Image (tube, rainbow, N blue to C red):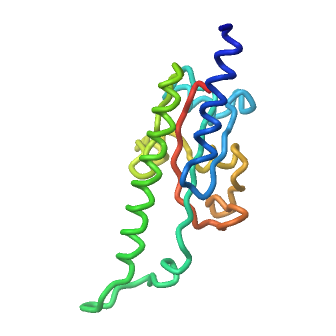
Amino acid sequence: MSDKQKTTTQNAILLDLLSRLDVDAVGIASLAEWKGTKLEETALRLLPQARSAIVLAMEVYSEILDLTLPERITGAASLNDLLVRDADFLSGRLTKIAYDVAKTSRSTGMKALPLPAAGCPQDTRFLEAVFSYKHAAQAAGLGKIGWHSLLITPGFGPRVRLSCCLTEA
């Protein structure tokens, strides 16, 4: 099998997996289209063989956000804990799915690096993430970054959690 046929087969397997994932949105940002940008630079620093960033998104339900309050009343039950538990749950699911994508990529012979939904490494000198999920999501066509620096998606507005998987595909 030629290298081109092998790559086509690998990509077909990965695309089949992506179509079956239990996420609300998935997008693929081709790093070749972002040549010379910080997105490409940071992705290649993490995985030198990276050709694309697969971005996974899940909705944060508006019903949970509606229950949160900006302040806590001493002694009163806090419904903000629901948001924390929901974020933990979504982060765990997204991280597992990113690992599933990486496992499938690796099983076809491609390099892959799953990035966690929560706890992405940060460059503390600049107080920014090592790899911007929001910018990758925008590059993958999942939404636009608003003036407040939040990713705004067409279907869910800013109410999404993100995870990524860098891959050779």
x and y, in percent, of residue 95 in the image? 43, 47
Using the rendered view, name the quadrant where residue 81 is placed: bottom left
x and y, in percent, of residue 105 in the image? 52, 29
Query: Please, which residue is most extreme toward the top here?
Result: 2
Query: Please, which residue is most extreme toward the right here?
Result: 33
Residue 27 vs residue 4, the one in the foreground: 4
Q: Residue at x 52, y 58 (%)?
A: 161
**Which image quadrant: the N terminus?**
top right
Using the rendered view, name the quadrant where residue 140 is placed: top right
Residue 115 vs residue 76, the one in the foreground: 115
Q: Is residue 147 above or below residue 113?
A: below
Number of numbered markers? 0
x and y, in percent, of residue 114 in the image? 46, 37
Query: Please, which residue is most extreme toward the left here?
Result: 75
x and y, in percent, of residue 156 in the image? 65, 67
Q: Residue at x 63, y 32 (%)?
A: 52
**Which image quadrant: the C terminus?**
top right
Q: Is residue 125 above or below residue 51?
A: below
Q: Is residue 105 above or below residue 91?
A: above
User: Is 168 left or right of 126, judged from the image as shown?
Assistant: right
Q: Residue at x 51, y 26 (%)?
A: 45
Q: Residue at x 67, y 62 (%)?
A: 152
